[in-house]
Amino acid sequence: MIACVLPAALISLVVQTGMMVVYIDLTLSGASSFMESIYTPEELYRVRNGRGLSLAWRMGLLVGGLGVVPMLITLFCYMHDSLGNHQDAMITMAEYSMLGMVMGVVSIVRGIQRPLNKLIVHMDEVALGNYAVKSRVYFSDEIGHLKAGFNNMLDGLREREAMRDMFGKYMSGEIARELLQPGRVDLGGVETEAAVLFCDIRDFTPRSEKMSPHEVVAFLNRYFQAVTPHIAANHGVINKFIGDAVMAVFTPLLGSAEYAADAITAAVDMRAALAEHNAKLPPEERLHFGIGIHVGKLVAGNVGTKTRREYTFIGDTVNIASRIESKTKEFATDLLVSRDALDNAGGKVTSLARFTSVGPVALKGKTTQLELLRIMQNPV
């Protein structure tokens, strides 16, 4: 009796183990509230420590318990001419084994296909910019590691996007994209044609002396918010804020093909924006600024050390644009451009404003004089 019961018990154990492994996973994968109760939110999205059965082991247990073992029993009985004595039992075993095999295979396939389909949907969401589509990891098999890898990728993408967003707040989006390109963070530069625009508030120092530091910052932020968006709107980039001054660069390197025309257009738009900003202020609080524009060659690139660097623009064009801006007080105007800048713009800005020459002007530190033009009111 024992000789019959013991093999039957072992066979039953193998069969039940194979079925249990399959159906426990299937049941737990659908019990999201139960999994939430036993794991922390962080643990739900990563592979946890511990042993787990791979997909190959699960499939092996299922096939072994419901396919190979019954086949071996049938073969054994056949070889010992005892198949006829147990024919009904063998048929019943085969039927149950076949049914269990089909159900088990379907369960395993669903356990693979369903999470893979979800991952495909999540990847489509990521391609659209949605990074809040992490996949829960219930088991430490191959699918679990795939989900955990996907979640790690999302964390990296979110961090990169946050870095890009932070770059965009502290420098222009164009420069941020340039720096994020592979191989663009090394020290060095590239020569480019560009227009440089300097804008400075008139008589800011005596005005700021009457304000607290917090009031000065709030005052400047409101002013910059009013006038500087027109720089980006005309394909320019803000290279830096220098107190109450702003330096903007327009270059094909960063998207401004018509750099001189773009710079002059931005200056005219900034003038209109300042007028609109002043209309909301009492007369004693209204602002005036000066803008100088020049074109020429610049070197654009990373300057500094291996531990601290800045993407900036260097060249005589920057110095000349700054000195042109300082001349706006002398000529009682708010906009001055060099003849080189106007000639480079050609006829693209004639509809924006009238230009009147103030003659050759000596600039500090320059041996030759430079012809400057005053930008008058917009033509009617």
Image (spheres, rainbow, N blue to C red):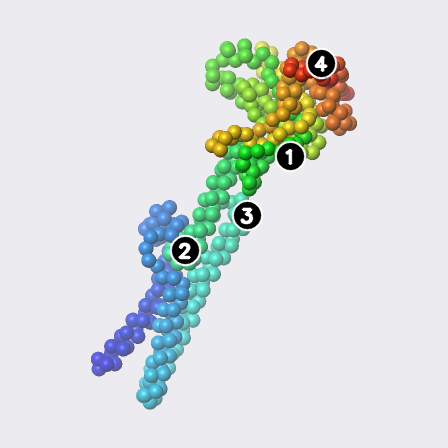
Question: Which one is earlier in the sequence, the residue at label 4 or at label 3?
Answer: 3
Question: Which one is earlier in the sequence, the residue at label 3 or at label 2?
Answer: 3
- Residue positioned 37% across, 79% down in the render: 71
Q: Are marks 3 and 2 in contact (CB under 8 Å)?
A: no
Q: Which residue is mark 1?
A: 253
Q: Are marks 1 and 4 in contact (CB under 8 Å)?
A: no
Q: Which residue is mark 2?
A: 144
Q: Secondary structure at mark 1?
A: helix
Please, what is the three-letter code of the amino acid marked with disc 2? Answer: Gly
Mark 2 closeness class: few <14, some 14–19, many ≥20 residues within 10 Å: many
Instruction: Say which of 374 and 101 sits in front.
Output: 374
Q: Which mark is residue 348?
A: none
State how far apart marks 3 and 2 are (Cα).
22 Å
Please, what is the three-letter code of the amino acid marked with disc 3? Answer: Ala
**Residue 217, percent from left and from top:** 50, 20
Q: Which residue is mark 3?
A: 127
**Residue 293, percent from left and from top:** 67, 22
Res. 184 visible in picture: yes
- Residue positioned 36% across, 78% down in the render: 70
Depth check, mark 2 against mark 4: the one in front is: 4
Please, what is the three-letter code of the amino acid marked with disc 4? Answer: Val
Q: Secondary structure at mark 4?
A: strand
